[in-house]
Image (cartoon, rainbow, N blue to C red):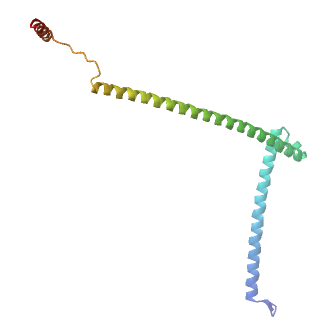
Amino acid sequence: MLIDGRVTPQELEFQETMIAEREAEIREIETGIHELNDIFRDLGTIVEQQGGLVGISPDQHRLCTANVDVDNIESNIVSVAQNTSSAADELTTAHEYQRKAGRRMACLLVILIIVIAVVLLAVSWRGRIGQHGLTRRRSYLSPDVFKDILLRAAGQRCSR
């Protein structure tokens, strides 16, 4: 309010805070415009790179960006579809290999168990045969012992 053509200190303070807020908002808008400018530059660079992939010069690209973008998107979709199909085939093949490897491992495990069982049975039977005296043992007689046995056998025949 004006009192005698002068601005009151409260009004002056209010006006200064309003000016400071407006300056802060203007700076935020300026920062946003700079960020938007950077985004558009990056987008322009990306569009030019994609145009180069299709084989169009940057000038031609500017003339037909809509067609190039559609063609590029379409080719990317076709490429993704092909890659997905081939990935599905690879997964199927890998699943078959894994299943066959599991079968082979099971077969090898069964064979290993059978071999271990046969070895354990052989060791077990050999020990049992040896314990019960069923093994044939060779004993070598010294000549003196052999002569003594012969004389005893001959003596028993003569006495009869």
Query: Quarter holding the N terminus?
Result: bottom right
Is 40 rendered above or below residue 98? below
Q: Nearer the viewer, residue 144 or 63?
A: 144
- The location of residue 62, given as percent across then percent down, is 88, 46
- The extreme front residue here reads 160
- The location of residue 75, given as percent across then percent down, is 82, 40
Q: Nearer the viewer, residue 104 or 91?
A: 104
Is 83 rendered above or below residue 43? above
Residue at x 28% of width, y 27% of height:
131
Which quadrant of the view contains residue 123? Answer: top left
Is 107 rendered above or below residue 147? below
Is 36 rendered above or below residue 55? below
- The location of residue 58, given as percent across then percent down, is 85, 43
Give left or right: position of 34 versus 110.
right
Q: Nearer the viewer, residue 109 or 23?
A: 109
Give left or right: position of 70 versus 137.
right
Which quadrant of the view contains residue 48? Answer: top right
Q: Nearer the viewer, residue 120 or 94?
A: 120
Q: What is the count of numbered marks?
A: 0
Give left or right: position of 40 versus 146.
right
Which quadrant of the view contains residue 99? Answer: top right
- The location of residue 23, given as percent across then percent down, is 76, 72
- The extreme bottom residue here reads 4
Query: Quarter holding the C terminus?
Result: top left
Give left or right: position of 152 versus 61.
left
Residue at x 26% of width, y 18% of height:
137
